[in-house]
């Protein structure tokens, strides 16, 4: 937790002095950690694991069920539906460009994609597996997985470590470059409409990008208090303060209601909004954010301009091949 | 229902005189009905609709959730899990090669893929939409779907009729040719192992293919009583007689426990077995079938041979591209 604390401290100290570069282009490749260099074999295995519902107790929920790679990388629900119809309290963040988050989960409790990937599989209301030992036993019983793991990591390599590394390697390929904004940032002044350009200017002017900074507009791993400015009406209407965020991980006073700054990339495709998915539309989300984070009562016109700009952050989704999952001839887990 | 009755009657009358051609190769194309010729635009739209969880009330269940196109075309569960974790009493049949079924559903209550596609969407325990009017309203509100339907069916064409036609057109492309059996049937005597050849011979000899006849080994729309031969022990152990099958549709005495003959294509990938998914392994399924349908107590060796042959019915799954579902920028249904 000391790492998270120190990140938070730096940001709090840095405050509004944080450098803002609103015209960063999204990289086409995500950096990989030294102990998990990206390889084609890992990506292929990860793509298959990510879409395999047999990583859940019921055989009905894959990573992609809540982080839909055919859509905006999540499920467009306030909260996700895991095994047996259970739901949790938070809204699934998008997997697209998650490789550019310095920490994962709304409360930042995972320091890497690898660490994140391990969580939902054994969460009782998400994928519901009893243990990673059980997951590994399942994978080991599938000949096709034996081959895929051998190709990616060597013989007899099926483990929690390798499975999560493969999933993370695949996720590092889920990048959506070439949004209208990126084309604009690279110099094509016609890539954004006049309204989108006004929205971009306004977003910089009022301070949206102080927190949503950098090429992924995610503050590169920063945490911020949300809501920052007391507003009893909005807090009640959207239950904004019920979830204590980082505090629920650290238990330290001062961490209450701190959340990771989420990316704004493809934000138009990830309604409903906020950690609890309580706000249905992007327009409303922009207004609420302006009020409770920046103390600004945004006009309808400015809101529409910012929403238009945010729509320009929808990137090009790479064409993907549909994986064929290795079968279990003659038998099943269920 | 008169159509179903007449099909059943013909089969019952024909009895064991039904011509068996066990060496039919699976066609690479499925015939389309006159009012729904297959076109690339329909197939593309159908592929997208088939994988869109927004066709369910919760936004969590697509056609592919239970008919997994990344696996054996179903979910490897005894019964499928629909919206809010609900389950029904029957096992999802495979969508692969469903185009070669003369009727759809275990009780054959749908006369076409088009008719079948309409069912689960508004079934309260499957996809849970209140009505097709609600489905159409959702689709109409998505600009991307407006374009896709226009391309496939002309302007302002979104309807239950066109949506189910597109899904059916896509399903007609889900064919798995070139199994080892097909290669053998085409003359490559080395495509089947000795054991598989023994299994094929045995399956013909004891009468498996009297019902599981034709290139899809599905009896081309025939219904058969299951279980046919009284066996209190097995009926109780696997609840074989609880579901009355065709009778639950027609209400006519004589239809009790009649079911559509399911395809044996890719049967190795579709455990657990039977209409209620009560038997976990293919080996056990073969033994039970021999006992209650043919009155044969199959030896372990013959069972293993037949299972080996059935594994030779696993075909080549066509490479598919992952669809990108049209988004709903700035908002959501959920």
Image (cartoon, coloured by chain):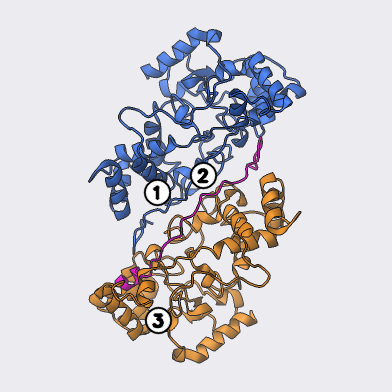
Chain colours: A orange, B blue
Residue under label 1, please give it.
B57
N-terminal label among 2 and 1: 1
Q: Percent from the top left, x then y, of residue A39?
A: 62, 62
Q: Which residue is mark 2?
A: B319
Q: Give the residue drawn at x 31%, y 82%.
A: A201
Residue nearest the observer in this picture, A125 or B305: B305
Q: Is residue A133 left or right of residue A109?
A: right
Seen from the viewer's position, the closer of residues A159 and A86 is: A159
Quadrant containing the C terminus of chain A in the rendered view: top right
For image coordinates 51% across by 63% down, the residue present is: A174
Report the front residue among A146 and B10: A146
Dot 1: within a 10 Å radius of its alpha carbon, few (fewer than 14), some, or many (20 or more) residues?
Answer: many
Name the residue located 75 percent from the left edge and 54 percent from the top edge: A155
B201 over B43 or under it: above or below: above
- Predominant SS of the magenta segment: loop
Q: Nearer the viewer, mark 2 or mark 1?
A: 2
- Please give the range of residues in magenta: A307-334
**For numbered disc 3, what is the local secondary structure?**
loop
Per the image, the residue denoted by label 3 is A22
């Amino acid at each position: 937790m000391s790492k998270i604390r120190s990140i938070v401290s730096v940001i709090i100290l840095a405050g509004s002095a944080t450098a803002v570069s609103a015209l960063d282009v999204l990289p086409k490749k995500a950096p990989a950690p030294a102990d998990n260099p990206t390889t084609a074999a890992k990506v292929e295995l990860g793509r298959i694991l990510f879409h395999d519902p047999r990583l859940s107790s019921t055989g009905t929920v894959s990573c992609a069920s809540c982080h839909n790679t055919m859509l905006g990388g999540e499920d467009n629900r306030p909260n996700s539906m895991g095994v047996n119809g259970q739901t949790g309290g938070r809204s699934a963040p998008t997997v697209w460009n998650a490789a550019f988050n310095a920490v994962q989960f709304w409360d930042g409790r995972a320091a890497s994609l690898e660490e994140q990937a391990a969580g939902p599989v054994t969460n009782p209301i998400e994928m519901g597996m009893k243990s990673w030992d059980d997951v590994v036993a399942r994978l080991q019983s599938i000949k096709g997985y034996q081959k895929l793991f051998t190709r990616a990591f060597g013989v007899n390599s099926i483990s929690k470590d390798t499975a999560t590394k493969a999933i993370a390697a695949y996720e590092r390929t889920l990048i959506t470059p070439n949004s209208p904004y990126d084309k604009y940032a690279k110099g094509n002044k016609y890539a954004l409409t006049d309204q989108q350009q006004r929205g971009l200017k306004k977003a910089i002017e009022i301070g949206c990008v102080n927190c949503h900074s950098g090429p992924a507009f995610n503050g590169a791993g920063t945490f911020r208090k949300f809501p920052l400015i007391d507003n009893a009406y909005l807090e009640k209407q959207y239950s904004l303060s019920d979830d204590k965020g980082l505090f629920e991980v650290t238990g330290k006073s001062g961490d209450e209601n701190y959340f990771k700054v989420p990316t704004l990339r493809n934000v138009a495709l990830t309604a409903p909004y906020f950690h609890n998915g309580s706000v249905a539309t992007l327009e409303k989300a922009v207004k609420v954010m302006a009020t409770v984070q920046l103390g600004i009562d945004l006009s309808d016109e400015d809101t529409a301009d910012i929403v238009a700009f945010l729509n320009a952050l929808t990137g090009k989704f790479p064409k993907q091949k549909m994986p064929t999952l290795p079968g279990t001839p003659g038998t099943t887990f269920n």
